[in-house]
Amino acid sequence: MAAPTTKAFRVDSLLRERASLVIPGGMWGHQRAEAVPAGFPQFFSGGDGARVCDVDGNSYIDFMCSWGPVILGHRHPAVEDAVRRRLDSGDCLNGPSEAAVELAELMVRQFAHADWAMFQKNGSDATTACVTIARAGTGRRKILVARGAYHGAVPWCSPSMVGVTSEDRAHILEFEFNDIDSLDKAVETAGADLAGILVSAFRHDLGIKQEMPSVAFAHAVRAHCDRVGAALILDDVRAALRLHLAGSWETYNVRPDLCAYSKAIANGYPLAAVTGSDAFRSAASDVFVTGSFWYTSAPMAAACATIEEVNRIDAPGLLNAMGTRLRAGLAAQASAYGFEIFQSGPPAMPLLQFANDPNAELGERFCLESLRNGVYLHHRHNMFLSTAHTAAVIDEALDATDRAFRTLAHKGMSNDGTCLRRAV
Amino acid sequence: MAAPTTKAFRVDSLLRERASLVIPGGMWGHQRAEAVPAGFPQFFSGGDGARVCDVDGNSYIDFMCSWGPVILGHRHPAVEDAVRRRLDSGDCLNGPSEAAVELAELMVRQFAHADWAMFQKNGSDATTACVTIARAGTGRRKILVARGAYHGAVPWCSPSMVGVTSEDRAHILEFEFNDIDSLDKAVETAGADLAGILVSAFRHDLGIKQEMPSVAFAHAVRAHCDRVGAALILDDVRAALRLHLAGSWETYNVRPDLCAYSKAIANGYPLAAVTGSDAFRSAASDVFVTGSFWYTSAPMAAACATIEEVNRIDAPGLLNAMGTRLRAGLAAQASAYGFEIFQSGPPAMPLLQFANDPNAELGERFCLESLRNGVYLHHRHNMFLSTAHTAAVIDEALDATDRAFRTLAHKGMSNDGTCLRRAV
């Protein structure tokens, strides 16, 4: 068992310095330099199965999976082969290849609610297309979203208002996730102008306890949409294929009218998708949504290979089992070292938080110690498992987190945060 | 010299049938099935240099270049090698690779106005980011755009209003391209709320005569922005690297504050970019724009290889020479067969139109006959040359277009359109 080490970040530091000169803020979006805690690498050089490697050659068991896209492990052979076959003949051509049709057929078979499919590049493209289709199909304008939910980083839904105008959100109304009363009120406010209710597969907002939808809430969303003829839009960008093979709300027996996908559907290759029911097929053909790379075949071939593989091995079952194993191990370790932790979200997409740690400082220290021991965790964003996280990998990761908990305890850190300042 | 043939589209027809069941309208966006003229293939299987191949094995000299992305020819070895090297270690990781820094440095060196760069996936991502940064940097809201200009397919700029609300465009004002009076009026209307003027490198609107900006117009845009402290946003998504290596308005000695790129910068791999001046660096670091695949390294490595190669071989010079050769040949043929044509746009991105052909019916017939003779042209959208279009390739294409003109003439078609209905 390796001793804790201090990782060297020599190349990383040089790259950060260079980046600070030519990239605003050193990096943009959720990867912006200031969002990467001290002691974490910013730049990566490769990935293999359950492991990712930074530019200084440090290897980590990876529980972010590229922030979701990697579901079969980095560089899964079946996916890589499918991509290379496409690249060998041509990826970006004057129109789609047959992969577009094969993937659309596959998704219609795969997802219980789906009668049709269309493809984009970003998760934001898919959620925006859903909103546009819902408005086109209903002739109405209001879209209901849960307060604090992340549906993308374009003006109508960005978590930031910097550079965004109030008109960009003129027809966006909010409710509280899992709160049927607040949903009822928002539906009433929208009145005859309700085009759709957009809801994430579960509450995976940054830095808060993750929450599965209650059965009653999921059914209330469906009932409202049915009553007024609005679209139930499921944002399955983050969760698709990790929770249920036929769609993340199949467990609740609630089917959306429109569903947005991205992240894991092509195991890391850039693709997003919208599926819909026949009721919205005509609207989907009436709207104009497009992009220069929305017809390229390699990511579609990657998606076909990914979907086939997640079915073959029952990825949701595996991820749930391994996530449960991880969760149990972390719970036992926390208890043994005297820490009170909360673990929330589905086991396949877990979040670990410490009690009395509102700014996640203790969480960050724990992740930093885990990182030093070769495990890449996140303290505020839900993490992701891939099917390359076998029992042996989970156990190896748990060895590392055990050392991380032990270090925290030895340094006198605790849930009351008293020793945190000194220890940092 | 091959005789004209009727292309077989057996596989294409089957794919169209299958697509019509699972994809709304058979295909979405600018590739939607009804937008593909009868006799044109919808589905493609590969590309090589200046040629593209459809799913039935028909090969064409390609003057669409994947609607712009392919500038060095399909599957250029230097680009493909760079991509494969990245894929061999890992493309989509927990953060960017050093390729992000290398590419940002390269773009800052390449584009005269650029002090910094950031990357996205779609052209729409880049134009939307520019608008958001302009608003953040100025604290104002109004964006001026030329009437009919294409800046993407998201609600604030989509050419279609289906599913779009009027509030999505609350702060978009229009002027006429190359019309300084109308620009002055729009600036006056925006008043103290002018955040930016967004303008394409040239007027490349669908189905109309293409138009380069006048020197006076380009300077008027710059002067207005300077006077009121608004951002000059150049939409160079379509033209970048094809007209001038240092930015498409360098010819006019006019530099933008913000510039949007996509299409050709990675020779077909999915990437978009924004560059900006120091005046907007802080705003660019303040806005939140991101995407799951915006940090992947293979497209960035492809862009580095592409930019190096277009410099090495002076791509704009080559494209201009070959576009001029094509244009001269077409002009001579048209004249010889008694057709009056207009050729507009820069030679590197040409458009051919027939006189007295408002619905481009004669243009479509000409493209169809060229297609039968092995040349893929477009009758309404500007076309694109790549550096794989050598003089020999241009001459081979001209042999085909000569046959196409001859067929039209033999069928009695002419600019007055009298024989068109019968001939179709």
Image: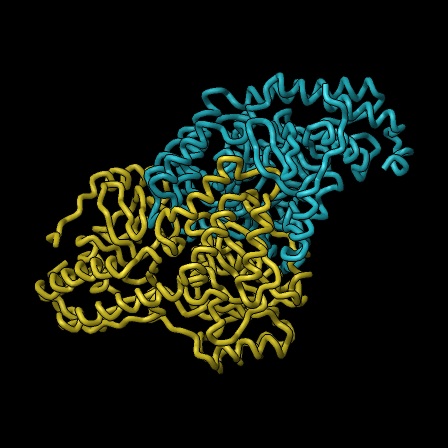
Chain colours: A cyan, B yellow
The residue depicted at 33 percent of the width and 44 percent of the height is B26
Residue A53, horizontal then vertical, whole percent = 62, 34
Q: Could you say which quadrant of the image residue B132 lies in? A: bottom right
Q: Nearer the viewer, residue B110 or B263?
A: B110
Residue A274, horizontal then vertical, whole percent = 46, 41
Q: Is residue A404 above or below residue A228?
A: above
Image-based side of A405 in relation to A241, left or right: right
The residue depicted at 68 percent of the width and 48 percent of the height is A14
Q: Nearer the viewer, residue A310 or B304?
A: B304
The residue depicted at 38 percent of the width and 43 percent of the height is A91
> In the rendered image, which quarter contains the C terminus of chain B?
bottom left
The residue depicted at 25 percent of the width and 47 percent of the height is B41
Q: Nearer the viewer, residue B361 or A6?
A: A6
Q: Is residue A335 above or below residue B155?
A: above
Image-based side of A109 in relation to A28, left or right: left
Residue B32, horizontal then vertical, whole percent = 34, 49
Q: Is residue B42 above or below residue B261?
A: above
Q: Is residue A112 visible?
A: no
Give the total number of marks visible in the rendering.
Answer: 0
Image-based side of B106 in relation to B412, left or right: right
Q: Is residue B211 visible?
A: yes
> In the rendered image, which quarter contains the N terminus of chain B?
bottom left
Residue B318, horizontal then vertical, whole percent = 35, 64
Q: Is residue A375 above or below residue B49?
A: above
Q: Please, which residue is most extreme toward the front here?
A: B312
